[in-house]
Image: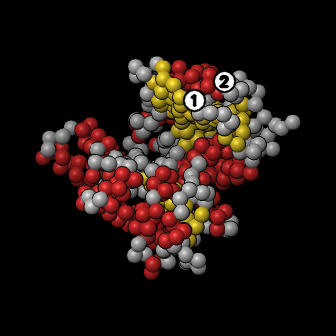
């Protein structure tokens, strides 16, 4: 009889709850689901068990408490109810942990208070994450619940990479610095890259490009993030689906003074009406490529701006790392858009980067190399799995037995390695 090892992973947004139930004994994904449009007149529930047909229906879901109950009901229909003794922990994705949270953390009232204290630097995300945490604790107050922070993986950045060149006292008082995001993805993918290359993780240097609707890059040296593209918020860095990425800060002042725009309007412009959608009206790379094939100049320019920014970050992180073993593409665009991968390394042959056209054209599959044989720097595609990473870290921390997956043991070792590193300005995190 196997040791109980099920972990529920929750990702609570402002109007949605995504969930996955995993069995850490064998890494099986038992069910996935989504409750969206919470609080609207008609909400949608989609549920996919690993053994059985996908179910989808609509009903009114008033709040996150009702959303979690709806998810629990769907799981119970498959014999996977949250009252099962097989469920040993619940892991929560939390977007912002500041500098206080450098590793997965067991949730208690003090941890909740700290996450709440960070709301000013993550006003769109942390409040929603807290809703999910509070409702899950009400639903199963007896279970260990773990917060896994998007920012945690990036807390290993040296101060010269994390600090902005502004007045130090002002920065410390208002917690202004680079935090980085997508950390669970960067952690998972960088570790899988070392496995793909057959190298020890602590001796592998990689550049990870997480390219979804949100996009970020990281430079990872021996399992430690040493630089990342997102900053105080997820707005900085690469061109994204609806976010501008890097921009002259004075653009904000210019729009306020010349266009008479209020701060909230500028915020909405840069976060929701910029990036690819601002440039050409589409944020779906498949549609942009279709338009390019039809000769659409706006779509071509948007694609060129997007990939030009990628090349700039690849070149910068090659310089930061000194030695790079692989450049890795992940997430929806990174895993599926061969044209983006090709354009991102175009002209970088002198730095050892190139893709093999036939390998790069292959769609789907697991971790794979798309660079030519003998390439000085490997180019790889590695599907990300943030939910599995959260589940592994949750299972390791929750003390759910020694029979857990190898990934759980890896997470425990990594957590121990990170725990001693606290910043001198932690009190301001």
Residue 160 shows up from this direction: no
Q: Residue at x 50, y 77 (%)?
A: 352
Q: Secondary structure at mark 2?
A: helix
Name the side, left or right, on which 277 lies relative to 109. left
Judge whether residue 184 can be spotted in this image: yes
- Please indicate whether residue 58 sits to the left or right of residue 135 in the image: left
Q: Is tag 1's residue or tag 2's residue first in the polypeptide sequence?
A: 1
| Residue drawn at x 55%, y 65% as measured from the top left | 380
Q: Which residue is mark 1?
A: 55
Inter-mark Cα distance, 1 to 2: 11 Å
Quarter of the image where the N terminus is located: top right
- Which class describes the residues within 10 Å of circle 1: few (<14), some (14-19), or many (20+)? few
Q: 159 or 57: which is nearer to us? A: 57
Place of residue 18 in the rendered image (x, y in percent of width and height, measured from the top left)? 54, 34
Coordinates of residue 24 in the picture (x, y in percent): 73, 42
* Residue 337 image-quadrant placement: bottom left
Task: Please report contact status of discs 1 and 2: CB closer than 8 Å, yes or no.
Answer: yes
- Label of residue 129 in the image: none
* Residue sitting at x 67%, y 62%: 195
Helix, strand or loop at disc 1?
Answer: strand
| Residue that lies at the very extreme toward the left in this rendered image | 258
- Relative placement, left or right, of 88 versus 347 is right
Give the residue at mark 2.
77
Q: Establish if 64 lies above or below 386.
A: above
Q: Position of residue 151 (x, y in %)?
A: 51, 47
Residue 294: x and y, percent? 29, 59
Residue shown at the point (32%, 42%) measured from the top left: 272
Residue 225 vertical position relative to residue 11 in the rendered view, above or below: below
């Amino acid at each position: 009889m196997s040791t109980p090892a099920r972990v529920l992973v929750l990702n609570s947004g402002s109007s949605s709850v995504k969930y996955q139930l995993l069995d850490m004994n064998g890494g099986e994904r038992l069910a996935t689901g989504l409750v969206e449009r919470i609080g609207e007149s008609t909400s949608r529930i989609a549920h996919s068990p690993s053994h059985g047909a996908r179910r989808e229906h609509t009903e009114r879901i008033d709040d996150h408490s009702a959303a979690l109950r709806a998810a629990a009901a769907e799981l119970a229909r498959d014999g996977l109810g949250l009252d099962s003794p097989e469920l040993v922990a619940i892991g929560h994705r939390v977007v912002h942990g500041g500098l206080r949270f450098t590793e997965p953390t067991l949730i208690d009232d003090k941890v909740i208070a700290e996450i709440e204290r960070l709301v000013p630097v993550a006003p769109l995300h942390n409040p929603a994450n807290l809703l999910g945490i509070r409702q899950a604790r009400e639903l199963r107050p007896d279970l260990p619940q773990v917060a896994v922070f998007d920012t945690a993986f990036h807390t290993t950045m040296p101060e010269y990479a994390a600090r902005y060149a502004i007045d130090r006292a002002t920065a410390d008082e208002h917690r202004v610095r680079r935090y980085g995001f997508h950390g669970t993805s960067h952690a998972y993918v960088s570790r899988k890259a070392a496995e793909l290359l057959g190298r020890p993780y602590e001796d592998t240097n990689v550049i990870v490009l997480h390219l979804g609707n949100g996009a970020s890059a990281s430079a990872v040296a021996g399992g430690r993030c040493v630089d990342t593209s997102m900053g105080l918020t997820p707005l900085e860095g690469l061109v994204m689906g609806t976010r501008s990425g890097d921009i002259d800060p004075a653009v904000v002042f210019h729009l306020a003074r010349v266009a008479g725009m209020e701060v909230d309007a500028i915020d909405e412009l840069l976060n929701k009406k910029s990036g690819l959608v601002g440039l050409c009206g589409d944020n779906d790379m498949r549609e942009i490529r279709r338009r390019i094939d039809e000769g659409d100049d706006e779509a071509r320019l948007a694609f060129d701006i997007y990939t030009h920014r990628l090349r700039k970050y690849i070149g910068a992180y090659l310089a930061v790392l000194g030695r790079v073993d692989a450049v890795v593409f992940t997430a929806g665009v990174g895993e599926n858009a061969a044209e983006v991968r090709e354009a991102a390394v175009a002209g970088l042959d002198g730095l050892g980067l190139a893709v093999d056209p036939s390998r790069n054209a292959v769609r789907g599959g697991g971790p794979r190399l798309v660079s030519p044989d003998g390439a000085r720097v490997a180019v790889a595609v590695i599907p990300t799995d943030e939910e599995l990473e959260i589940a592994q870290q949750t299972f390791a921390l929750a003390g759910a037995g020694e029979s857990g997956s190898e990934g759980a043991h890896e997470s425990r070792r990594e957590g121990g390695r990170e725990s001693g590193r606290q910043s001198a300005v932690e009190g301001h995190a």
